Structure formats: structure tokens, C-alpha cells
Image (spheres, rainbow, N blue to C red):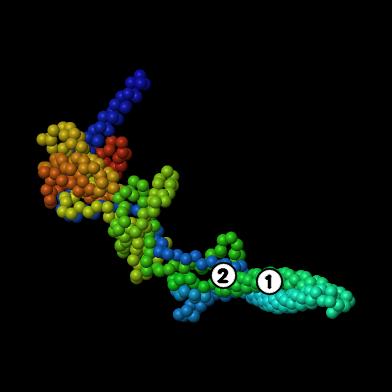
Amino acid sequence: MLKTFVFAAIAVGAAATGGWFWTASASTSTTFREATVERDTLVVTLTATGTLEPEEVIDVGAQVAGMIREFGHDPKTDKEIDYGTVVEPTTVLAQIDDAIYKEEVQLARAACKQAHSQRAQAELAVAQSEANVKRAEADLVYAKARWAQAERDKARGEKLRNTSAISLQELDTLISMAEQMAAQVTISEAALTQAKSTLQSTKSMIEEAQGKVDQAEASLRKAEANLGYTTIRSPIHGVIIDRRVNIGQTVVASLNAPSLFLIAKDLTKLEIWASVNEADIGQIRIGQKTRFTVDAHPDDSFQGEVSQIRLNATMTQNVVTYTVVVTVDNKDNKLLPYLTANLQFQVAKKEDVLLVPNAALRWQPRAEIVHPDVPRGAPESAGGGTGSSSGRSGKGRGGNAPRNQAMVWVEDNGFVRPIPVTVGATDGAKTEVSGDSLKEGMKVVMGEVRRADASSKTVNPFQPQIFNRRQQQQQQGQQGK
């Protein structure tokens, strides 16, 4: 018995609900949202985001360690170097405390002076050794001459010994003299050899002294260079876009030079580093025109040109992207470095083509509003009007989409009738279409609007009804009549 009651209640509720929905649908009127088929130029774009970068940035660092004592001054205003200062080549940016480096220069100069003195002494020693060699050579010549004379005297004495013209004692004297001269020649030769050896030794001393001079001069140049490095100068003409050090701060130069200033060479020329998906990179080419906007100037549109496609791709969460460099002219200095740019690369341009909104290709009518003359199943067999090209327009790749068959709908006496079309390129909002039955100025349906009929009143049977006392009296009076 209980089950019978439950099923009866469900049946009554279903009947009431169905009756309410039937009444609601029967008491509504349908109007269509339409768009006009236009003949215009279609520009197919590919969207991407990127960052504005200075064309060339110099990172100025310190080559020596020390405390920042002071900053330089603007060459035009004489104000202290700071963010945004325009600097020229050799403009002083900062000064590191140079007391220690000055002392090192003085020590290097003293060592250099000492090395020069030692080389001068070695040169004097070489000159003295050369004089000794010449003297030893002269002594050797003199000794050889006297030895030759003694040998001749000894020979004459030996000839006169048999004639009793010379005594035996005199002959012995001549022989002894010849032997002494021979010994003197040997001594002179040894002296000459020793003098030459001394000369070679002093020459090696002067070479050693010259080496010390070279080393001392190199140390002096190094000390002077380090002293010069305490003055940080701008290497180029540019604008300081970042100052990374303060007065009193100590910088430590080790293997990597610490960065003190970041200088942009020329802010009238900027670059956009845009990340382009691997599926779209084939549509980018050098020299391609690009338009972009920045949030800082939402009402302005800027132009650029693709100058470089970098081959070093990056992968983030299995998505491969390439960096495309776009050159931008910034003569008015309106654009600032590191702004986010929203780019549109012009992929294709179709002139004098028929265009319809993508919504018209996506819209599907209800079976009740399709004209009775249209054979059932025709819309589905014709492609259903989905417009597969437009479905991919969000990324700007419609320019290379295959030409597909689709469907648009036109109104016909309160109903809609299909018109088959061929879908071409799309810019994400409108799509190129063509067809024998499609004409410029024709109205195509993008959607329907269903409004309730004012003459009828739809009552929800499940909604509680609230009556006031007057309405209740009127109903009772009508029932009494």
C-alpha cells in the first residue's frame, strides 16, 4: 500500500513538472542574434608575450677590493651619479679607497729603483772585466815578444859558444831568460783566460740584473694599474639603470668581479625577448612586422620587427619555447626597460574576402527552429557548422589551418536555414568564408534569444504561492458567483 502511494506521488509530480515546462516553452518567443557578412581585409596574427630589454647592457664591476669612498658626478649637472644618470665614456662612477694601493705603488717604485741600481753596478763590472781582458791580451802579446827575443838571444849564444866569444855563464843566463819568458807567456795566457771568464760572469750578472729590473717594472705597472682600478669609470655612453653599491660599502673582487653599475648603451633602441611555442615558431621569420602593447600605455600600440630567432630552446613543464628577438624603435623614450609586452606577429594577410564572426560558425540550432523544408540530418552531414579552423584561432594559427567545410544559418520566417561554406583563415574573432550561396551583406545567425510571452503567465507548481487577504476575498467572490 505504501509503495503504491509513493509511485502515485512521483507520477503526479512528474506530470506537474512536465506540464509546467511545456507551458513555459509554449509561452516563449524566439528572436535571433545576427551578424552581417562583410567583405574586408583579414590579418591573421600569432600572439605571444615578452619582455622589453635594452639592446646592449654593460655590467660595470670592480677589479680591486676596497671600500667605496665616493661616487662620481654627472658631467652635465655635476650631481652625484645615481639611477638614470646619463654618462659618457671615462666618466667617473665611483672611487674606491686607494690608500693601500698608493703605498704599493711607492714600494714598487723603490724596488724598481733598486733594480736599476743593481743593473748599473753590473754594467760597471762588465766594463771593468772587458778592460781586464784587454789588458791580459796586451800582457800576453808583450810576454810572447819577450819570449821570442829571449829565444833569439839564446840561439845566438849557442852559436858563439864554440868561438869563445861568449862565456858559459852568459849562455846560461840567456837560456834561463828564454825559459822565464816562456813561463811568462803561459802566465799571461792564464791571466787572459781568467779575465775572459770574469767577463762572462759579469755579463750573466747584468742579465740577472736586467731581469730584476723587468720584474720590478712589471710590479710597478701592476701596482699603478691597481691604483687606477680604484677609480671606476664608464666604458661607454649610456644610462645607468641600476646602482648596486652604496658609499661605505666594501667590495671584494675575487674570481668574479662584483657588479656595481648596470649601464644601458642606448635606450632609444630596445628589444623584446618573446617566448614562442614550438608549434608556432615555424610561422616566425626574420623581418616580420609585429605590433605590441604594454600595460603601462594601454591605449597605445607600438611596432617592431623580428631581428633574431634564437635556437637555444627552453623546456618548461614539457612545453618547448623559442626566444624571438624583436627590435623596437624608442626614440621618444616612452617605453621603459623590462616592461611586459603583448605581441601580435602578422602571420598572413587576406584582402577582399568574406568574413563572418566565429560565433556564427560555432552556433547549432535546435531541431524545433530548423525550417521544415530542410531535410533532417543535412546539417550534421554538412559538417555541423562547427568551423574547425575557428576552433584553433585562439593561438593565431588559423592562417595555416586546412580549408574545411562548415555551416552558417540564416533566418527564414521564424526558422533557420543552413548555408554550406568553406572555412579559410581566422584572426580569432572573424573567419574567412566562401560559398556559392553566401553573399556580402547577408545576415547570419550567431544565437537565439528566448523571451517569455507577456500575455501568458507561467506558474511553477513547486513554488509556494503567497496570497494577500484582498486576493483571497476576490477568489472567494468569484467562486460564489
Q: In the image shown, does 144 or 475 lie closer to the viewer?
A: 144
Extreme front residue here? 163
Which residue in the protein does label 2 denote? 246
- In percent of width and height, residue 94 lies at 55, 73
Which residue in the protein does label 1 denote? 203
Extreme right residue here? 169
Q: Is residue 73 above or below residue 314?
A: below
Q: Write the residue at 27% across / 50% down.
A: 428
Any part of residue 452 in sight? no
Residue type at mark 2: give it. Asn
- In percent of width and height, residue 150 lies at 79, 76
Count the marks: 2
- In percent of width and height, residue 183 lies at 80, 71
Extreme top residue here? 1
- To which quarter of the image does residue 106 belong? bottom right
Q: Write the residue at 31% across / 63% down.
A: 302
The local secondary structure at tag 2 comes to loop
Residue 427 shows which numbered tag? Answer: none
Give the quarter of the figure containing the N terminus. top left
